[in-house]
Image (cartoon, rainbow, N blue to C red):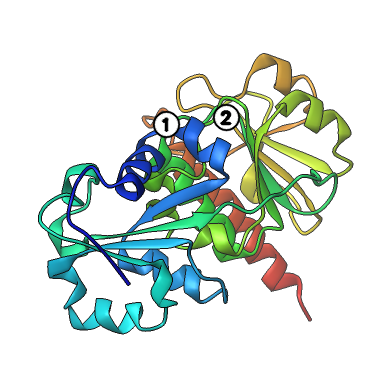
Amino acid sequence: MYLIQSAQNESLKRLGKLLKQAKVRRQLGLAAMEGVHVLQAYLQTGAFPEQVFVSEKRSSDVEVAKLLRLLPAGVVYVVTGDALSKITALTEADDIISVIKRPVNDVLPISGNGMLLEDVQDPGNIGTIIRSAAAVGLDWLVLSQGCADAWSPKVLRAAMGGHFTLPIYTDVDAIDWTQNFTGRLWMTALKQESDSVYDLDLCEDGVWVMGNEGAGISTGLLQYCAKSVHIPMHAQTESLNVAMAATICIFEQQRQRLRSKP
């Protein structure tokens, strides 16, 4: 266990960069995750973080102290004063930050049951989608080059451990990948000729495609879709949040699959 007393400590300065800069996270192959519950979920996979930073005051908390005892002593950094709170959005009540290695997923899937996100910008939306995708047991999640960083602290926090049970592929050319995918495509779009998600047979494998919060799925990607999908809504409702729409679609698929089992 190490004691950090200065905000100018090199490990603490690197942590600040990991929290704020996607470029640094990619270059180092690392991610910084905030909070106790995400660390607990990570430890359940059998892996250990590279580093864990905790405020001196928080380290004496019963729950945190119990968690720290599970870690190798060499990864724990106790930070005195308010140096840690200055670089994180967390409150003092949850003042713990872990640095982990990002998994390397090089070979893109061309079959199976998963989801493609095209240019989804909001970290909260991506985190919620990851959490839902993990909950229904999707095989993988693919994010286009225009998406927010899937390994940012906000996404990790919103996903609540979903990253650790679901292969995630990032910075993917969505159109190129779609051309190589061998399964069915379900593209969500508010088009007159689209099918209701509740009228489709979703028991087969395929990929759900979700588009940008404002613009939806791009015209370039829509051309590879033989049939688009919509969620029936009250006439006065314009649309749903992309994370909510994604969750509804994959849980409807889950419902159909569970019902079809003998």
- Residue 71, position as x, y percentages in the image: 42, 77
Q: Is residue 236 above or below residue 250?
A: above
- Residue 197, position as x, y percentages in the image: 63, 45
Quarter containing the C terminus: bottom right
For the point 57% across and 77% down, the residue is 46
Instruction: Report the front residue among 196 and 142.
Output: 142
Q: Which residue is mark 1?
A: 235
Residue 211: give its label: 2
Instruction: Report the front residue among 236 and 94.
Output: 94
Q: Is residue 193 left or right of residue 205?
A: left
- Residue 7, position as x, y percentages in the image: 20, 45
Q: Is residue 211 left or right of residue 58?
A: right
Tell me which corner region of the image, top left, top right, bottom left or bottom right, holds residue 189: top right
Q: Residues within 10 Å of mark 2 (few under 14, many from 20)?
A: many
Q: Is residue 246 left or right of residue 224?
A: left
Q: Earlier in the sequence, mark 2 or mark 1?
A: 2
Secondary structure of the residue carrying tag 1 is loop
Residue 232 shows in this picture = no
Residue 172: give its label: none
